[in-house]
Amino acid sequence: MGVLITVLVVFAVAALALLALSLRNVQQYEKGVVFRFGRLLPDIRGPGLRVIRPIGDRMRKVSVQTEVLGIPPQGSITADNVTLTVDAVVYFRVIDPVKALVNVRDYPSAVSQIAQTSLRAVIGRADLDTLLSDRDHINAELKKVMDAPTEEPWGLRIERVEIKDIALPQSMMRSMSKQAEAERERRARVIAADGEFQASQRLSDAAATMADTPGALQLRLLQTVVDVSAEKNSTLVMPFPVEMLRFFEHQSQETGGESIHRSIPRPALPERPEFPEPITSAAPAAPAAPAAPAAPAAPAFLLSGQRAGSHGDQIGRRAEVARERRDNWPTHAASDSDASPTGG
């Protein structure tokens, strides 16, 4: 009797062990794939308590949740030869547990490698401006490139790919900042020029209105005077009337376009005194009365260093003295006539 009880207890313990080995709990977010003696069973076990054979069957659970995989920073060169570093993030999930287990080993690592190579390839085909301004297009193209080798062969679906950050060299960042500053300055100048153009149009309309009504121009002039003198200025600036300029313009047109100049009298220069030329005669001069020969002396003219016309009376007296000395100057003919009797 005791032996029977022992055998029954052994069989009960064995049955409980086999039952524990044959029961599997599958979560709601998992799928169970059963391999019997290494062969895949076509039935995929859903969530709940599932029973398998304790001997020969092996269940692998695959999560169908969306997994997030970060791509390490990748250095690449864009289509316009700009070196930069880009990192991204990939969102994927398993849609076919059988392919994810059978066709690929360690599918998260495989997705990471595919994401890195695809990221470098997409960046190499895009230029810097597109990469910075059109992120959605780059993300969509990157997702399309990664879907081809992962969805059909591996049973994985790439739900979303996003570029997190783009690291540019310092020199490129300075160049881009200068370009942005120049663009802002260009827009500011265009806006200022447009404002000046509109203001000029308004001023032209106002000028046409004032031309039709001359009283409006006078009222505007008075208003300008009031604005200038509003701050208690001691100096009042009055604008020059435009009508006077028009008057001078009409006068210049009537005179044939000649300009009006003020005539400034110039002082008349005094006439230089004229000295009579000496009278020479070929006939012999009459003998003169003997007189004591005087020592020849050179005439002294004190006219050098004086301006003509500054002392008219003094110049006249000096001219008379010079004329008298010239008349009394002994000539060669008189000296010959005086010397001939003494020699005979």
Image (cartoon, rainbow, N blue to C red):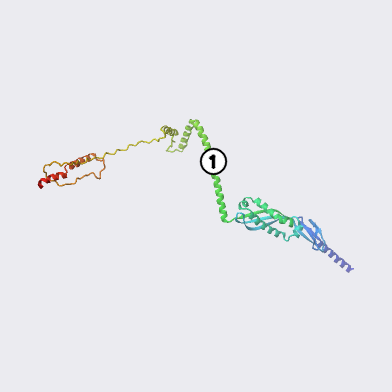
For the point 66% across and 50% down, the residue is: 137
| 277 w.r.t. 140: above or below | above
Q: Is residue 201 visible?
A: yes
Residue 302 lies in what quarter of the image? top left
Q: Is residue 136 left or right of residue 37?
A: left
Nearest the viewer among 198 and 300 is: 300
Nearest the viewer among 182 and 344 is: 344
Q: Quadrant of the N terminus?
A: bottom right
For the point 88% across and 69% down, the residue is: 3
Residue designated by label 1: 195
Q: Is residue 70 visible?
A: no
Q: Is residue 113 left or right of residue 292?
A: right
Q: Position of residue 89 (x, y in %)?
A: 67, 55
Label 1 sits on a secondary structure element that is helix
Type of amino acid under label 1:
Gly
Residue 123 lies in what quarter of the image? bottom right
| 66 w.r.t. 220: above or below | below
For the point 87% across and 67% down, the residue is: 7
Q: Position of residue 42 (x, y in %)?
A: 80, 58
